[in-house]
Amino acid sequence: MLTAILFFSFLGFFLLYNTSKKAELSRSFFLEKWVEARPKTGKAVALLLLTAALAGSIYHWGTGGGFFSFLVILMTIASCTVLIAPLRYINYKGVAVILLVCMVAEIVFKNAGK
């Protein structure tokens, strides 16, 4: 569940970041090209992803804890994205590897306590 919340938060913020006219975009990631061609649809999808991450966070941690956890997650992801994206380190292979490692770690550590 935590991996999905983190991924939806990252993807939602990354899409909103790429709809900005001030951001320096690399346009190497297919998602960046798609958002550049359809900025209104990209913003709608990004807000939907952020809403899903917020709903998942509230479901996982409760109302107060979920809301504040979502804010902390979003602030962390936003600051990392703003720092790393202009350096062009974010690509689909890296995102896929990080997502896979997080999913495996979540499954392993969730089942380790049983």
Image (tube, rainbow, N blue to C red):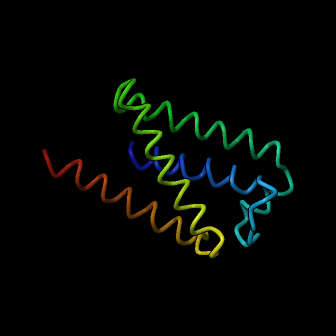
Q: Is residue 65 above or below residue 25?
A: above
Q: Is residue 25 above or below residue 62?
A: below
- Residue 49 position, x and y percent, is 60, 41
* Residue drawn at point x = 51 percent, y = 46 percent: 74
* Residue drawn at point x = 46 percent, y = 49 percent: 6
Image quarter hosting the C terminus: top left
- Residue 24 position, x and y percent, is 75, 67
Q: Is residue 69 left or right of residue 42?
A: left
Q: Is residue 2 above or below residue 17?
A: above
Spot the residue most to the top. Answer: 63
Q: Quadrant of residue 85?
A: bottom right
- Residue 32 position, x and y percent, is 74, 61
Q: Is residue 102 left or right of residue 97?
A: left
- Residue 97 position, x and y percent, is 47, 68
Image quarter hosting the N terminus: top left
* Residue drawn at point x = 73 percent, y = 65 percent: 30
Q: Is residue 52 left or right of residue 97?
A: right
